[in-house]
Image: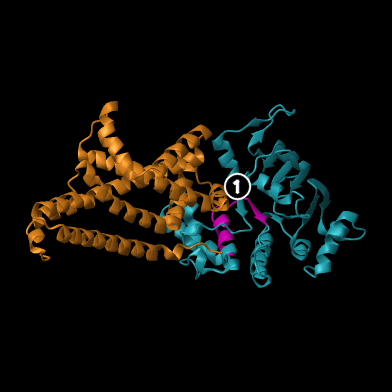
Amino acid sequence: MTRPAVRIRDVHKSFGNTEVLKGIELSVPKGSTTCLLGPSGSGKSTLLRCIAFLEETTSGLIEIDGDPLGFADPGGGRSRTRLSAGDIRRVRAKIGMVFQQFNLWPHMTALGNVTEALVTVQGMKRSAANEIGNQQLARVGLSDRGHHYPSELSGGQQQRVAIARALALSPDILLFDEPTASLDPELTGEVLNVMRELAETGMTLVIVTHEIGFAASVGQKIAFLDHGKLLLDGPPAEIFGTPRHPRLEQFLETYLDRGAATLV
Amino acid sequence: MSIDFSVVWQQLPQILSAFWNTIWIWIVATILAVLLGFVVAGLRRYGPLWLNLLLRLYVEVIRGTPFLIQLFLLYFGGPFIGLSLEPIPAGLLGMTVYGSAYFSEIFRAGFAAIPPGHVEAAECVGLSRGQIVRRILVPEMTMLVLPQLVNMAIILMKETAILSIITVPELTLVVGAIGSQQYAFVEAMTMLALFYWALVEISDWLGRLAEKKLSKFRFAV
């Protein structure tokens, strides 16, 4: 068996006295799409941010393709040590992140956003970086928008630029934190289509989403969190098939009540 | 007694040299004040707490006292603590300190207005701390605070008139002296006002030009 793209071992995370993650165990198989579902405050976004190392776990370990992220536990016991900044950076380079708020840099064009790290971090020549940047923009259907500033783009276009920015660094794993939550329903579709295409290319995706229909159709693995614990973890057919876990049933009902999503 | 500008006009070479002094002292002091203000704001945000409190005191004291008094204390009180400066260096130092307190407050607000997610996105693509400051924070903040920066620079320009009290040979001192020598106060002061007004208009126009160039980078909502 190949090692998982992401392995999460007994991860706890507290903010002050509030424990947000209470011992999460999860592995993300390579080349799969894993969707993290759960009600607000369940800890799904925090878990994703821990995988991106935007938050540091309080205890436990996260491995990216077998390499420890941020902290290692050489003894295999309960004491973990912090890795060097260089090691952290090397492992983080395997991960791309897409945010709910896009977080494009407003003083750079779409192409500038996509190529920034290639030039500044990797020291690539401007022309070579632009070539990659244009390829990635074409991949998300925005080849004619490279010279537009974020303020000149729609929300859906901005989010696709943000996806291109992450793709330009050819990450092994792409993380999405509620990528469509701040988009109109009309614009949601164009972003979900790009994500669906990425899933089909066999890239490893970890997606926090409220788009349950999307999760059920594209996800190969569903992880359902509630109150900081991983309640359910399995393929969509198993998770969404009957009989359903009562907590999941309750969660789905609130969505179906609003007519916001339907299960496929 | 009639208004006669020719008495002042005859001293034009002297006035132009004073005009030049006003301009270069203003520009140099503004640049230094912006740099110092940026450092103060950066240290307050990212430095240790004690430094933040110390710098806050600095900003509060400078903003809470009149520039005239600061300048007096620096020029006439300085020698008592071994700081004897010629008029121009004293004027430059005084304006830099005075301006830096205001600029630091502008930058502080600018730093606070940048969404933290923009920095997180930069971390995620591997930018180092220094690269984030250089490539993301500074340009983004500059565009946010540019109107306030221009405004403060214009205020500083007019404050250069106060340097006349420590005998910096700038416009106010020189034109004022011509006025009293020739008993032509109204002419001298009118001319002085026109010079400053022209300067303000020019810097305002430059500021608008810069803003227009930057307007494309507005925040996406």
| Quarter residue A74 falls in | top right
Residue A163 forms part of the magenta stretch: yes
Image side of residue B186 versus residue A114, left or right: left
The residue that disc 1 covers is A94
**Residue located farthest toward the front when viewing the structure as drawn:** B1
Q: Position of residue A52 (x, y in %)?
A: 63, 47
Q: Position of residue B104 (x, y in %)?
A: 42, 46
Q: Residue at x 18, y 49 (%)?
A: B173
| Quarter residue B73 falls in | top left
Q: Residue at x 27, y 42 (%)?
A: B92
Q: Residues in magenta?
A: A160-177
Q: Residue at x 41, y 44 (%)?
A: B63
Residue B130 vertical placement versus B118 (above, below): above
Residue A58 forms part of the magenta stretch: no
Using the image as rendered, state which of residue B8 and residue A36 is in the foreground: B8
Using the image as rendered, state which of residue A235 and residue B104 is in the foreground: B104
| Residue A3 appearing in the image | no
Q: From the rendered image, report the letter of the chain displayed in cyan.
A: A
Q: From the rendered image, report the letter of the chain displayed in orange.
A: B
Residue A60 vertical placement versus A242 (above, below): above
The amino acid type of the residue labelled 1 equals Lys
